[in-house]
Amino acid sequence: GGLGDSIAQLLSRELPTPLEMVAMNDSFGESGPPMKLMEKYGLTSKEIITSAKKVINRK
């Protein structure tokens, strides 16, 4: 029910578009070194690239 979900709903109505959600799934943020936090929440460049490839392969 967050921002990503709202955007996905709009796209599905107006311009059907393959997408992959990249976000902190239902968890509270924490403090710490940025790279460690990105690793913990699956937001490193490697994981984002993997998600982008999933979308490209679905097209």
Image (cartoon, rainbow, N blue to C red):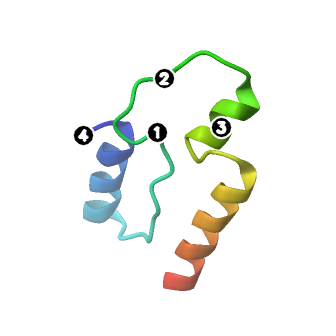
* Mark 4 to mark 3 CA distance (whole Å): 22 Å
Q: What residue type is labelled 4?
A: Gly
Residue 7 position, x and y percent, is 36, 47
Rendered image: mark on residue 1: 4
Instruction: Indicate the quadrant where residue 49 lies.
Output: bottom right
Contact between labelled residues 2 and 1, with CB atoms less than 8 Å apart: yes
- Using the rendered image of the protein, determine whether residue 59 is visible from the camera's viewpoint: no
- N-term-proximal mark, 2 vs 3: 2
Determine which residue is flagged by label 3.
38
Residue 15 position, x and y percent, is 36, 66
Element at label 2: loop
Element at label 1: loop
Element at label 3: helix
Determine which residue is flagged by label 1.
24
Q: Image point 59% across, 78% down: which residue? A: 56
Determine crowd level at label 3: few under 14, some 14-19, many 20+ residues with C-alpha closer than 10 A. Answer: some
* Mark 2 to mark 3 CA distance (whole Å): 11 Å
Determine crowd level at label 4: few under 14, some 14-19, many 20+ residues with C-alpha closer than 10 A. Answer: few
Q: Which amino acid does label 1 sit on?
A: Met
Q: Which amino acid does label 3 sit on?
A: Met
Contact between labelled residues 4 and 1, with CB atoms less than 8 Å apart: no
Determine which residue is flagged by label 2.
29
* Mark 1 to mark 4 CA distance (whole Å): 13 Å
4 sits left or right of 57 in the view: left
Rendered image: mark on residue 37: none
Q: What residue type is labelled 2?
A: Gly
